[in-house]
Image (spheres, coloured by chain):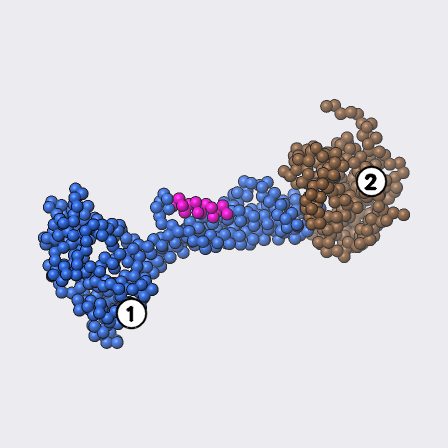
C-alpha cells in the first residue's frame, strides 16, 4: 500500500467580492497516493484552478484540512509554506511564467536559488539534468522569446522538476498548445509519472484526461465524479498516430 | 550563500534593465558629484583666502588708531591721530611676544622718473617691515636703521611701479625717482607678490624710511599704524592682548573707557573672511543636497514602478519557494546596488569636475575627504530608505494575487 501524498477533507474556499460571497469550493475531499497521475476536470468556474492553487500552497482554504505527507498545512507559517513549495511541489502554469530575457538554464535554476543548501555547482548540474529530461539541453542558453510555446512549457516542466519534488501540479499546462505539442508534453508527464512522481493535472480537455490513471470531475465546487482510468492511453503512441507535420 | 544568491538575482535584474538603471542613477550621480564639487569649491576658496592672508604675513599684527566700532559716524583710521611714535617705542620695549615691529605712515602720490609717472602709495617704515610682511628683495638692499635715523631719501619700489616708471627694462637700482617732487634714490626692488584676495595690487608700493616720509612728504607727527609680528602664529592672540594692555596704559585709558585704537591679528581677519566663504559653502551644499534628495526620490519612483511591473515575477518567485524576506532583500539589494554604483560614479564625476574647474576655470578647489564620505553615506542611506517601501510592498504580496496580477 503506497503512502498518501495528498489528503484533503471537506475543503471549502470562499471569495468575498464586495457584498457577494462566491463559493468556489464547497466541501471537497479526496486523497492522492504516491505515484498517481490524477487529472482534475471541469468546466470553467468549477473551482478546479482554486483547488490546484490550494494544493500548491499558493492559496489558503477557508475551511477544511489539507495534509501533504501527513503534515497539516494550516499550521504552517508563510515561510514554512514557501519551503514546502520550494522542496516538495513543482508547479506548472498555463502561461509558462518564465522569466523574460533570462536563459532557459537560469529559469530552471530559479527554485534552487531559494534553497540555501544547494551550491552553485549542484544547482547548475541539477538544472542541466532537468533540461535533459525534457530534451532541451542544447537550448539551455536560449531565452524564452527564442523558444516556441511547447519548448517554453518544457522549460517550465524542467523548472518544476529541478528540486526533485514529491508531486507536480499542472494548471492547464497544455491549454495554450496545439494537439501535437500537447501530446508531446503529455508523454513527458507520463514518463515522469513512470519514474514515480505524483502528478495532479488540471485540464478541461477530455482527451488529455485519457492519459492519466484517475480523473476527478468538479462542478460548481463539488466533486461529481472520481474514477480510476483502467485503459490509460500512451501519449507517445497517440503522438505517433498523428499525421506527420510538413516542414 | 542565500545573500550571495539574492545579490546575483538583484544584479541580474539591474543588468537586464541597463537604460532604466542608468536613468535612475543619474539623479544620484548628479547629486553626489555636485556635493563633492561644491564642497571642493567652497573649501578651495577658504584655503586660498587663508593662503593669501598668510602670504601677507600670517603672524602679523596691525595696530590702527581709532576704535573698531565707536559711534555711528566713523572716519577712516588715518584720520584719527591717536597713534604716535612714543606708542611704538613703548610697545617695542615692553611687548615680549613680538619679534618685529615697525611704525607705518603712508600716503598717496605720483612717482616720477623722467617722462614716466605713475600714481602710487608710499609706505614709511623701518627695516623690520620686510620681515613682518614676508616680502623678499628681488635686487638691491633694504635701507638701514642709520638711514632711518638720518631720514635719508632712499626708497624701494614694487614691481608695478618698476613696470610703469622704468618701461625700457633698465635696472632701477641706483636710479633717482621723485615722489611728490621729493627725489629718492632707488636702492632695491621688491619681489613680486601679485594681487591679494581682496584685489589689491601688493606690488604697487614705494617703501622708504618712516622718518623721511613722515617729515618730508606727509608732514605729520603721528603714525597711520603700527605693524608687528608675533613670535609665532600661536602667540598672535596673546600678543594682541599684550599690546592692547600696553597701549591702554600708555594712553591712560580708564577702565570704563573704550580703546582708542584697534589691534588685530591676521588670524581674526582670516576667520572673518572664512566665515563669509563658509556661508557660501553651506548654500552650495544645500542646493547640491536637494539634488541628492531628488535622486533618492528617483530611486523610490523606479523601484516602485519596478515592483508593479514585476508583480507577476514576484508571484512566480514566491511560487517556486521565495520567501517574503527573500523578495524584500532582492529589491532592497537592487536599490542599494543602484545607489552605491551611482554614488561611485558620482564621486568619480565629482572629482573629475573638480579637476576640470581647477585646470580650466582656475578656481581654487580642495577636495575634502569628509565630503566624499558624507555624500557616499547619504546616497547609500537614500538607497536603503527609498528602496525599503517598495521592497516591503513587494514582499507582503500574496503569491496567488501576485501571479494573477496583469
Residue B107 visible in the picture: no
Task: Choose between B228 and B32: the one closer to the eye.
Answer: B228
The Cα–Cα distance between marks 2 and 1, rounded to whole angstroms, is 99 Å
For this view, does B99 lie left or right of residue B324? Answer: left
Quadrant (top left/top right/bottom left/bottom right) for the C terminus of chain A: top right
For residue B294, side relative to residue A190 (left or right) = left
Colour of chain A as rendered? brown
Q: Position of residue B253 (x, y in %)?
A: 22, 74
- Based on the picture, tell me whether residue A134 belongs to the magenta stretch: no
Q: Main secondary structure of the magenta part?
A: helix
Asked whether B248 or A57 is in front, the reply is B248
Point 55% across, 42% down: residue: B20
The spot of residue B158 in percent (x, y) is: 20, 51
Write the start and end of the magenta stretch as one range: B344-357
- In this view of the protein, which residue sits in the foreground, B250 or B19? B250
Height in image: B14 above or below B270?
Answer: above
Amino acid at each position: 500500500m503506497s503512502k498518501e501524498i495528498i489528503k484533503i477533507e471537506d475543503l471549502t474556499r470562499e471569495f468575498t467580492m464586495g457584498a457577494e460571497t462566491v463559493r468556489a469550493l464547497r466541501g471537497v475531499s479526496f486523497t492522492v497516493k504516491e505515484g498517481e497521475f490524477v487529472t482534475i476536470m471541469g468546466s470553467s468556474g468549477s473551482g478546479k484552478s482554486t483547488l490546484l492553487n490550494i494544493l500548491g500552497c499558493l492559496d489558503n482554504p477557508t475551511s477544511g484540512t489539507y495534509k501533504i505527507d501527513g503534515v497539516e498545512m494550516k499550521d504552517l507559517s508563510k515561510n514554512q509554506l514557501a519551503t514546502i513549495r520550494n522542496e516538495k511541489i513543482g508547479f506548472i502554469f498555463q502561461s509558462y511564467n518564465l522569466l523574460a530575457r533570462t536563459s532557459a538554464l537560469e529559469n530552471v535554476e530559479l527554485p534552487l536559488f531559494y534553497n540555501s543548501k544547494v551550491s552553485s555547482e549542484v544547482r547548475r548540474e541539477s538544472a542541466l539534468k532537468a533540461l535533459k529530461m525534457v530534451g532541451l539541453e542544447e537550448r539551455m542558453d536560449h531565452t524564452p522569446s527564442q523558444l516556441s510555446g511547447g519548448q517554453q512549457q518544457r522549460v517550465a516542466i524542467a523548472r518544476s522538476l529541478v528540486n526533485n519534488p514529491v508531486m507536480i501540479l499542472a494548471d492547464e499546462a497544455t491549454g495554450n498548445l496545439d494537439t501535437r505539442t500537447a501530446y508531446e508534453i503529455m508523454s513527458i508527464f507520463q514518463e515522469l509519472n513512470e519514474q514515480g512522481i505524483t502528478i495532479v493535472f488540471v485540464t478541461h480537455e477530455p482527451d488529455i484526461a485519457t492519459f492519466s490513471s484517475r480523473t476527478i470531475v468538479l462542478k460548481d465546487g463539488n466533486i461529481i465524479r472520481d474514477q480510476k482510468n483502467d485503459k490509460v492511453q500512451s501519449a507517445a503512441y497517440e503522438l505517433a498516430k498523428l499525421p506527420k507535420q510538413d516542414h | 550563500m542565500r545573500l550571495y544568491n539574492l545579490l546575483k538575482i538583484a544584479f541580474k535584474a539591474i543588468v537586464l534593465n541597463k537604460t532604466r538603471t542608468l536613468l535612475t542613477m543619474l539623479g544620484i550621480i548628479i547629486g553626489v558629484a555636485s556635493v563633492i564639487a561644491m564642497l571642493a569649491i567652497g573649501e578651495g576658496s577658504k584655503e586660498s583666502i587663508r593662503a593669501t592672508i598668510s602670504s601677507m604675513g600670517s603672524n602679523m599684527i596691525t595696530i590702527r588708531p581709532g576704535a573698531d566700532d565707536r559711534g555711528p559716524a566713523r572716519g577712516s583710521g588715518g584720520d584719527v591721530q591717536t597713534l604716535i611714535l612714543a606708542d611704538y617705542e613703548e610697545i617695542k620695549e615692553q611687548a615680549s611676544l613680538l619679534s618685529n615691529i615697525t611704525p607705518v605712515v603712508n600716503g598717496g602720490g605720483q612717482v616720477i622718473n623722467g617722462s614716466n609717472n605713475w600714481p602710487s602709495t608710499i609706505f614709511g617704515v623701518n627695516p623690520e617691515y620686510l620681515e613682518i610682511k614676508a616680502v623678499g628683495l628681488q635686487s638691491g638692499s633694504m635701507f638701514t636703521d642709520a638711514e632711518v635715523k638720518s631720514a635719508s631719501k632712499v626708497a624701494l619700489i614694487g614691481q608695478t611701479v618698476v613696470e610703469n616708471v622704468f618701461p625700457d627694462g633698465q635696472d632701477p637700482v641706483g636710479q633717482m625717482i621723485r615722489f611728490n617732487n621729493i627725489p629718492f634714490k632707488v636702492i632695491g626692488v621688491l619681489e613680486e607678490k601679485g594681487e591679494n584676495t581682496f584685489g589689491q595690487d601688493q606690488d604697487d608700493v614705494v617703501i622708504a624710511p618712516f622718518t623721511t616720509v613722515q617729515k618730508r612728504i606727509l608732514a605729520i607727527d603721528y603714525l597711520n599704524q603700527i605693524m608687528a609680528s608675533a613670535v609665532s602664529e600661536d602667540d598672535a592672540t596673546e600678543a594682541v592682548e599684550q599690546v592692547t594692555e600696553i597701549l591702554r596704559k600708555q594712553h591712560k585709558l580708564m577702565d570704563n573707557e573704550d580703546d582708542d585704537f584697534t589691534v588685530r591679528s591676521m588670524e581674526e581677519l582670516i576667520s572673518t573672511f572664512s566665515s563669509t566663504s563658509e556661508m557660501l559653502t553651506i548654500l552650495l551644499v544645500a542646493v547640491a543636497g536637494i539634488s541628492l534628495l531628488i535622486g533618492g526620490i528617483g530611486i523610490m519612483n523606479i523601484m516602485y514602478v519596478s515592483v508593479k511591473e514585476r508583480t507577476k515575477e514576484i508571484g512566480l518567485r514566491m511560487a517556486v519557494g521565495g520567501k517574503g524576506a527573500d523578495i524584500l532583500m532582492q529589491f532592497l539589494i537592487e536599490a542599494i546596488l543602484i545607489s552605491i554604483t551611482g554614488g561611485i560614479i558620482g564621486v568619480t564625476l565629482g572629482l573629475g569636475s573638480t579637476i576640470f574647474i581647477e585646470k580650466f576655470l582656475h578656481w581654487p578647489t580642495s577636495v575634502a575627504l569628509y565630503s566624499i564620505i558624507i555624500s557616499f553615506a547619504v546616497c547609500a542611506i537614500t538607497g536603503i530608505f527609498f528602496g525599503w517601501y517598495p521592497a516591503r510592498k513587494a514582499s507582503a504580496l500574496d503569491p496567488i494575487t501576485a501571479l494573477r496580477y496583469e
